[in-house]
Image: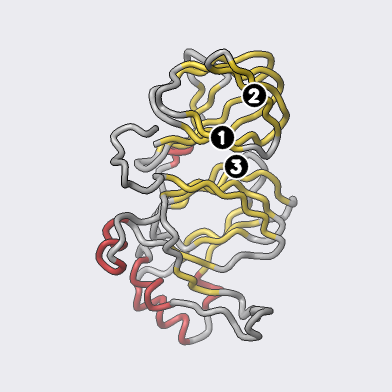
């Protein structure tokens, strides 16, 4: 199905739907080097959020203001964590790129599509002192390990990576992220759109409904559906009125 992937290799990307009724825990993921160094894992976890819904005042936690690990440790000891964390406003259709090593969390009342490297390595930095209803205790946090894999100072990705670029040959397709780990496009279908690709892709219908046509077969698709187009299929069509977020390596 995939290009240049061994038969025993894990699926290269994860796709999740997040519905944050309250702020999620502040987390960080290791990059590839730190995943191998500290956790004996093959790769780290760079990810992105595509915002599907958000209240007008919704924010995401994104990055920090500490210049070094020592400064962060000092501020945590002095109970000044709030002054370290930075937030950004979010709105529907935003694409937020979260490189590994970035402190991050969705704030309350946000629904997002999360696309990431295939890894479950998550280090919880702060959990707002919440009590786990099952254990009756606060959930565990991993501050020392989290700081060890956090970027210092905070790294802001190049804006060019998330600058929308319309496909010259097919204006229905807009590239909205070009990272070393995965590419993300938004496909807006009005009527009929032919897609030509060289790699497999993961597709999520985020708005509307319509039909996928490939190999002389038609498949009804609608909001919330996710499907994979394998590498051997080079040409297919979308018909209807819908928006699709497409991810591939």
Residues at discs 3 and 2 in contact (Cβ within 8 Å): no
- Residue drawn at x 38%, y 23% is 198
Q: Are marks 3 and 1 in contact (CB under 8 Å)?
A: no
Q: Is residue 228 above or below residue 235?
A: below
Earlier-in-chain disc, 3 versus 1: 3
Q: Secondary structure at mark 3?
A: loop
- Please name the colour scheme applied to the rendered image: secondary structure
Q: Quadrant of residue 39?
A: bottom left
Of the numbered discs 3 and 2, the one sitting upstream in the chain is 3
> Residue 45 in the image: x percent, y percent?
40, 55
As drawn, the label of residue 212 is none
The answer for how far apart the CA atoms under marks 3 and 1 are is 22 Å
The residue carrying mark 2 is 219
Identify which residue, 229 or 193, lies in the foreground.
Answer: 229
Quadrant, the C terminus: top left
Proximity of marks 2 and 1: CB atoms separated by less than 8 Å:
yes
The residue that mark 1 highlights is 227
Q: Which residue is mark 3?
A: 94
Q: CA distance from mark 3 to mark 2?
A: 29 Å
Q: Is residue 192 placed above or below 174 in the rendered structure?
A: above
Q: In the rendered view, would you say 6 is above or below 121?
A: above
Q: Is residue 41 left or right of residue 94?
A: left
Number of other residues with Cα within 10 Å of mark 3, as a class: few under 14, some 14 to 19, many 20 or more: some
Local crowd at mark 2 within 10 Å, few (<14), some, or many (≥20)? few
């Amino acid at each position: 199905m995939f290009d240049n992937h061994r038969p025993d290799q894990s699926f290269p990307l994860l796709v999740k739907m997040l519905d944050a009724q309250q702020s999620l825990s502040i987390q960080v993921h290791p990059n590839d080097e730190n995943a191998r160094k500290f956790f004996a894992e093959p790769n780290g976890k760079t990810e992105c959020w595509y915002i599907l819904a958000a209240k007008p005042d919704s924010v995401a936690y994104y990055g920090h203001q500490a210049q070094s690990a020592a400064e962060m440790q000092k501020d945590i000891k002095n109970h000044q964590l709030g002054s370290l964390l930075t937030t950004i406003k979010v709105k529907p259709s935003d694409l937020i790129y979260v490189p590994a090593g970035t402190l991050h969390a969705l704030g309350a009342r946000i629904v997002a599509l999360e696309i990431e490297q295939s890894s479950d390595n998550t280090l919880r930095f702060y959990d707002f002192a919440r009590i786990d209803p099952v254990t009756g205790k606060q959930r565990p946090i991993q501050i020392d390990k989290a700081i060890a894999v956090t970027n210092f100072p905070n790294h802001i990705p190049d804006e060019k990576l998330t600058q929308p670029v319309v496909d010259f040959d097919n204006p229905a397709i807009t590239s909205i992220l070009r990272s070393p780990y995965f590419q993300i496009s938004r496909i807006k279908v009005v009527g009929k759109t032919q897609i030509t690709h060289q790699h497999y892709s993961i597709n999520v219908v985020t708005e509307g409904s319509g039909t996928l046509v490939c190999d002389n077969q038609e498949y009804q698709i609608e909001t919330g559906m996710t499907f994979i187009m394998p590498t051997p299929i080079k040409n297919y069509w979308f018909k209807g009125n819908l928006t699709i977020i497409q991810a591939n390596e």
